[in-house]
Image: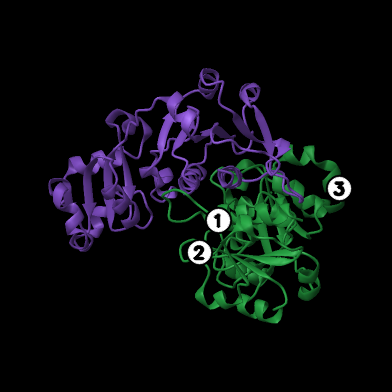
Chain colours: A purple, B green
Amino acid sequence: MLSKAQIKYVNALKIKKYRQQYQAFIAEGPKIARELLRSSIELEGVYALESWIRGHRDSLRAIEAIVTPVSEAELKKISALTTPNEVLVCARIPRPEANHQAVLNREMAVALDNIRDPGNMGTILRTADWFGLEYIFCSPDCADVWNHKVVQASMGSICRAKVFYEPLANLFEAHSDIPVYGAMLAGASIFEQQFGRTGMLLIGNESAGISPELHPYITHPLTIPGKGGAESLNAAVAAGILCAIARNQQ
Amino acid sequence: MLSKAQIKYVNALKIKKYRQQYQAFIAEGPKIARELLRSSIELEGVYALESWIRGHRDSLRAIEAIVTPVSEAELKKISALTTPNEVLVCARIPRPEANHQAVLNREMAVALDNIRDPGNMGTILRTADWFGLEYIFCSPDCADVWNHKVVQASMGSICRAKVFYEPLANLFEAHSDIPVYGAMLAGASIFEQQFGRTGMLLIGNESAGISPELHPYITHPLTIPGKGGAESLNAAVAAGILCAIARNQQ
């Protein structure tokens, strides 16, 4: 049985201000719930149908105290989905501790400049996860990755991503020894590029591309050669092609 | 000034049944409107703010009779967007005549199996257009490409696509001399594949992948090698990577 306070709290987490205040987010559906249960992310509450709880007794044993059985009608009151999907989890926003220089010296990372669409953001997290790129640096004007739409579109990849919000110019300035590969409309063909073990794969805004103030930091402006009529590629598709080709060389 | 009949007609085109009955579709916003005006697609009606009409006098001269100036409030009555965007166009669904065998002998094509999400569908059309792939074969259970959400997500690429709905097994059966490259979770690495000048790039459903009944027709099962935790790639991202690599060899 859901309390009024629980309903109020969960619904508050649909709003960025409250996610930041409470440092928590929501995720829905059996797939993401299962991934969260297996991850190191700290859970605050699991709201699920009896049938789902019965099927997950073993994985819920250690966190029984925070599991609340709910009816379908109750789930509807807290869900952000048009069709609620068995289970909703509240979890703490993880704060990955990172020595940026150590990370960037060791592995490739993704940098996102002003990606606004939650669906694109989630798809980029999922794509980076597929290619084993854990570190995601977002400009402060990117969509919030803890937005429930991003969480859903990431299909569970949010559980593994290490996400940082910071001005990209500062990041590039502080780590000027790391190559920055920028996906642009003009540049060398990505197919001609030799990618090293490290570097930042920079993807720009859905309609404006990479901000002009970041251009001076791009050590390798790259383009995805096209032959047709479209003016540009979707940002998540461009990110996918860049990640695929860069990672294939490693 | 909009008539009641116009409002009723435009709104009917948001529903597949009526699109099929009237063989027409709607598209919104200055970008797609401009591309439609330039294309060979037959227009039925242009509903636009006075300011937009003033800015496009030259391209509207030949079709003055079907241009209706509307107020913002009127545009809201017919728009499918949350925020109507200056202009809405009704156009005839084009019926590309094609000798499939001649097309398939000449160029690469895309085949889509049960792609359900209108956003993915539109993004795939946009991606195919970027890579100069004109011919798109869709299984009958794919989202309708003339759905306004697909039209919007295609960012104008719908004006150039040549789309056919037909059972893919029949298509593959009838053109068994053409290679079928299937994007699968298991198969040879797409990076090892030598693509020819022709062939069909087959993309499967968002969650189920390519239907089992199509597997026997796949001459080249291919996979996009991943290193991380995600279980799969978004269908539009997978399509983008497959198109990029296949087209780069041509």
Circle on res. A240: none
Q: Of the residues shown, which amino acid type is indicated by label 3?
A: Arg
Q: Is residue A53 visible?
A: yes
Residue position marked by numbered label 1 in the rendering: B224
Residue position marked by numbered label 3 in the rendering: B61
The kind of secondary structure element at disc 2 is loop
Residue at (53, 24) in percent of width and height? A168
Residue position marked by numbered label 2 in the rendering: B186
Q: Quadrant of residue A113?
A: top right
- Of tags 1 and 3, the one toward the viewer is 1
Q: Is residue A2 visible?
A: no
| For marks 1 and 2 on the same chain, the one whose residue lies earlier in the sequence | 2
Q: Quadrant of residue B93?
A: bottom right
The kind of secondary structure element at disc 3 is helix
- B217 shown above or below A191: below
Q: Of the residues shown, which amino acid type is indicated by label 1?
A: Ile
The answer to whether the residue labelled 1 contacts the one labelled 2, judged by CB atoms less than 8 Å apart, is no
The answer to whether the residue labelled 3 contacts the one labelled 2, judged by CB atoms less than 8 Å apart, is no
User: Alpha-carbon distance for marks 3 and 2?
Assistant: 55 Å
Using a 10 Å C-alpha cutoff, classify the residue at mark 1 as few (fewer than 14 neighbours), some (14 to 19) or many (20 or more). Answer: many
